[in-house]
Image (cartoon, coloured by chain):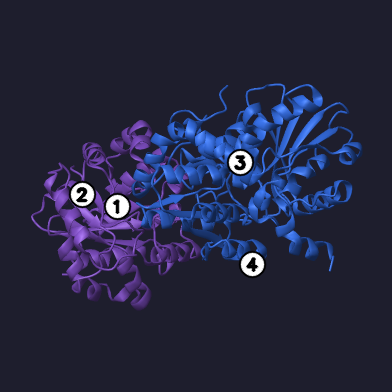
Chain colours: A blue, B purple
Amino acid sequence: MNYNADEKGYYGEFGGAYIPEMLYPNVEELRQNYLKLMYEDSFQKEFNQLLKDYVGRPSPLYFAKRLSEKHGCKIYLKREDLNHTGAHKVNNTIGQILMAQKLGKTRIIAETGAGQHGVATATVCALMGMECIVYMGEIDIARQAPNVARMKMLGAEVRPAKSGSRTLKDATNEAIRDWINNPVDTHYIIGSAIGPHPYPDMVTRFQSVISEEIKWQLKEKEGRENPDYVVACIGGGSNAAGTYYHFLHEPEVGIIAVEAAGKGVNSGESAATSALGKVGIIHGCKTMLMQTIDGQITEPYSISAGLDYPGVGPMHSHLYKSGRAEFYSATDDEAMAAGLELSKLEGIIPAIETGHAFAIFEHKKFKKDDVVVISLSGRGDKDLNTYIDYFKLA
Amino acid sequence: MSNRITLKLKEDKKLLSIYFTAGYPSLNDTVKIIEDLEKNGVDMIEIGLPFSDPLADGPTIQESSTAALKNGMTTEILFEQLRDIRKTVSIPLIIMGYFNPVLQYGVEAFCKKCQEIGIDGLILPDLPLDVYQDDYETIFKKYGLINVFLITPQTSNGRIDQIDSASDGFIYMVSSASVTGSKSGFGQEQENYFERIAKMNLKNPQIVGFGIKDEETFKQATKTAKGAIIGSAFIKHLTAYGTDKTNEFISLIR
């Protein structure tokens, strides 16, 4: 089976481009050009140079000895948290800002949940001297204050999304409206593996550097390119898409996704899309989506702003439906506990989003010889206030 | 019987079409609003099926949609409210909404219900041309529904030709690059756009939407186009004056 996007952007039955005509010229321009531009020698050269010198790639693949002892398997951490700006998000924004320049765009818009994508976008806009507007839900602005301040320092304008649940979904709506209102000079840097084709495929390709590096790094350490499992947390699914990409067609590699269960999958306050969703249209693609029987999109909940999204990227819907990936979900409490455990055992404070991936050990038992690579997608600095409140650290 | 939209488009006059969000201001205002609009000489009505995430709409229609959903509006309830609408109303009725609620109801079931009620067409901005042609055109046609496509000032002539040949009613001409309700008045850019489209001699007449709010903008929009659609301005009127002053609103347009 093919797990990549076909020419029209479908992963099995998921994907496509369900966009109003107002967005058609922009999306079509991107669709026609993205592969050609992205694989030009000059583009690749500039992209890889920036990933190396500016982002600090390759990010280490670190053998987590104490965590491995605790959970009885061989655990490697892919250290995306050590990237400039503190998460995997910058891999994609570097790629897309170069794409925007090639397309002659001068103004950049983005949506953000936890603020990591917003910061990564504001960063590359500062780097390239481009105007930057980031839409962020009002609730997220309150719970991710340090990232809001960082975006402002980097010269971006942060515009609050005040409608609906006032989180990531609504920030995305506002960004799309901005793009409709500014169809000529603006490029929309979507941060997750969602949106109309070609976004899910383009974002996945820019993030695929994660699994490309895992392959040769693991070869050096274990003498083999393929781990037994790759594990990632999933909101929209960009770090997961990048972590899985080069293993999708390696059947011996088990693919594991951990969604945010919030206060429990059946609590009514959850973002576990695979368990709670059904096929629908959100933000321009057909995918698994949390919605009412009437097709109204429901408001998700997670303690982590980055996973607080009612859908999941179309590639992941296909991985779920086809059975290629195992899907689990971790509650707020499990994710927070896993984050604390990683801090105490390995000296690494993860983002709360990332904590969900580490909660896999609550749900799945690995064998002693299993090599398990976990995407450590982001660092926890931005979440200190939430950690302080939750663990009463102050 | 010919589709009511087709017949209406043949009349020798500029058409005034009004959009409102079903379930707003109150859940059960739908029938009264439709009847009053017809009584006051409106030629065609777009009944908005509210959606939680209306991407192409500005704040006015967003807020009315949120309020309508809060009032309890659902696809089923809207169909129930419209069950006997053809006993009192004869102008063309179009349902306008986003694709996901239609998909969840079942596209064929939705179209069948529309035919039973006497709905003449659908406008689903996020159902793209190629998906419609590949998957849904035969269903729409089976139930006698006209599907209306949008064009914008950025739509290329080639694309407009494609849309024109895929259409069999009218083309919804979005006046400017914007979400609904965001621009005030038309400038040179719109004039040029209206003229450019007029010169293309499309087989389908065009009805202009977005940015029409009063007599002046209606006249500008219909100088070359067959008609114009007013949405946000009417919703604002409903918000301010309730459902009893429809005549006053329409009298300010023509």
Res A236 visible: no
Mark 4 to mark 1: distance in Å? 42 Å
Q: Which residue is mark 2?
A: B5
Q: Which mark is residue A142?
A: 4
Count of numbered circles in the view: 4
Residue A57 left/right relative to A331: left
Q: Position of residue A240 (x, y in %)?
A: 65, 39
Q: Which residue is mark 3?
A: A51
Q: If you read the primary sequence from the N terminus, does the residue marked by circle 1 or circle 2 appear first?
A: 2
What percent of the width, then of the height, locates residue A88? 65, 45
Residue mark closest to the camera, 3 vs 4 = 3
Q: Chain of mark 2?
A: B
Residue at mark 3: chain: A
Q: Is residue B180 visible?
A: yes
Co-location on one chain, circles 3 and 4: yes
Which label lies toward us, 3 or 2? 3
Q: Determine which residue is flagged by label 1.
A: B94
Q: Are marks 1 and 2 in contact (CB under 8 Å)?
A: yes
* Amino acid type assigned to the residue bearing label 4 in the image: Ala
The Cα atoms of the two marked residues, 3 and 2, are separated by: 57 Å
Q: Quadrant of residue B88?
A: bottom left
User: Residue at left 49%, top 30%?
Assistant: A41
Q: Earlier in the sequence, mark 3 or mark 4?
A: 3
Mark 1 neighbour class, 10 Å CA radius: few under 14, some 14 to 19, many 20 or more: many
Cα distance in 3D space between marks 3 and 4: 31 Å
Q: In the displayed image of the protein, which residue is found farthest to the left? A: B12
Q: How many angstroms separate mark 2 from mark 4 (CA)?
A: 50 Å
The amino acid type found where label 3 is placed reads Leu
